[in-house]
Every structure is written in C-alpha cells, then in structure tokens.
Image (cartoon, rainbow, N blue to C red):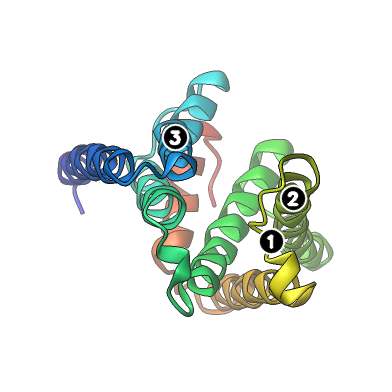
Amino acid sequence: MEEKKIKAVWYASIVIYGITLLYSFWKNMQTEDWHSVGMAFVAMLTPCIVPALFRLFRWKPVYEIYLLSNGFTYFASIWGGSLNAYRFWGYDKLLHFASGWLLCTATALLYFVVKQSCQWKDKREYRIFLIFLNAGNMAAAEIWEFFEYAMLVFFQNDCINHYTQGVHDSMNDMLCATTAGLLMTLCFVRYEKTGKSNFLIRICEKFCERNIRTEF
C-alpha cells in the first residue's frame, strides 16, 4: 500500500478512535459508571505511546506501526477498558493473542535498534535473535500481569480476576501471548529459509530502511 494511503488510513483511524472515545465518555457518564469514565481517560493516553517513542528516539515514522498501535489500543483501551467488552467470552484472550504478535515484532525492532543492524552475521547470532524474540515477548506478557496484580493490591481493582479465577486467568493470558510469539518466530524462520515475509516482517524491513539504514 502506498505511503499516502497508509497515512490516510491512520488519520481515519484517529477519527474513529476519537468518536468512539467521546461515545464512551457520554455512555459511562450517563450511567454514572465512574470507573469506566476513568478508563476512558486512560484510553486518551494509550494511542500516544508509540508516536511519543518515535519522537523521543527521533525515528522516522512508519505509519503501519502507528496504525497497528491505534487498532490495538482501540479494542483494548476503549472497547475493553471503557466499554467493558472484556465481559464477552474470549475477548480478553483474543487481545492477548494479538499482543503476542505485536510484542514479538516490537522485540525484533528492539533487537535491530540495539544492534544497529538488521542483519545477523551467522547462524549462531540468528538463533540468539530467535531466543531474544520469545524472551522479550514473554517478559512483556509477565510484566503486564505484574501490573494487573499491582492494581489489585494497591487499588483493589481486580482486573486480574484473582477472586474468581485465581492464577488461571493470568496463566491463560501469558499462554496466549507466548503461543502467538512462537507463531511469529516461525514466520521469521520461514523468512530466513525462503525469503517469504508477512505484513509484520515487512514493517520491520521498512523500519530498518528508514531508521537503521542497513539491509534486512
């Protein structure tokens, strides 16, 4: 997809995000659900995280990444956090599965940024890269569960479902993210062996071309 079209879709996603956010404020204030109103305020901030990181590190924008960030926070922060979509069966697990794909891609970008190269010298470094992908993805999933547990301990906000499911919810969430990360790893393996990529790997290529300037 051409750059202008991707940028236009990103702008459209911002408009949709804003309209839905306003609706969530209106709906929750009408029902006096102040917890969900607070989550709507959080949803105002979450889509700003990725663009802020790009500005902080002075990276040239990759609008596919911005679009994925908007899409994920739209369903996680607005519909899940503010409009209570997490009450629907499987919604939470689907988002954790999606997070595994996205976090594994983000971990790949982190590896390339730290290394300042998008190439691996040999098979040994390639295997280290694959391990790093999954270690980063699993660590991020675990840190998120730590955060949810902290919300329970310090604010009595049981987003971890501790009182109804115990550790079951947390383990399933991490399992969903880990499984998705392993599938993304297989995509990188296929790319190394055959040169066949997917949308997320092409995003890595574009990021490298614009910000690291070495061949993928």
- Number of marks: 3
Q: Which mark is residue 160?
A: 1
Marks 3 and 2 close (CB-CB < 8 Å): no
Among the two numbered marks 1 and 2 on one chain, the one whose residue lies closer to the N terminus: 2
10 Å crowding of disc 2: few (<14), some (14-19), many (20+) = some
Quarter occupied by the N terminus:
bottom left
Which residue is found at the position 40% from the left and 64% from the top?
A: 85
Q: Which mark is residue 152?
A: 2
Is disc 3 placed on a helix, strand or loop? helix
Mark pair 3, 2: CA separation: 42 Å
Mark pair 1, 2: CA separation: 7 Å
Is disc 2 placed on a helix, strand or loop? helix
User: Please, what is the three-letter code of the amino acid marked with disc 3?
Assistant: Arg
User: Please, what is the three-letter code of the amino acid marked with disc 2?
Assistant: Leu
Mark pair 1, 3: CA separation: 39 Å
Marks 1 and 2 close (CB-CB < 8 Å): yes
Among the two numbered marks 1 and 3 on one chain, the one whose residue lies closer to the N terminus: 1
Q: Which residue is mark 3?
A: 210
Pick the front one: 57 or 93: 93
Say which quarter of the image contains residue 24: top left
Which residue is found at the position 19% from the left and 46% from the top?
A: 9
Pick the front one: 206 or 14: 14
User: Please, what is the three-letter code of the amino acid marked with disc 1?
Assistant: Ile
Q: Is residue 216 left or right of residue 73?
A: right
Which residue is found at the position 52% from the left and 69% from the top?
A: 92
Q: Where in the figure is residue 82, as x and y percent of width and height?
A: 41, 48
Marks 1 and 3 close (CB-CB < 8 Å): no
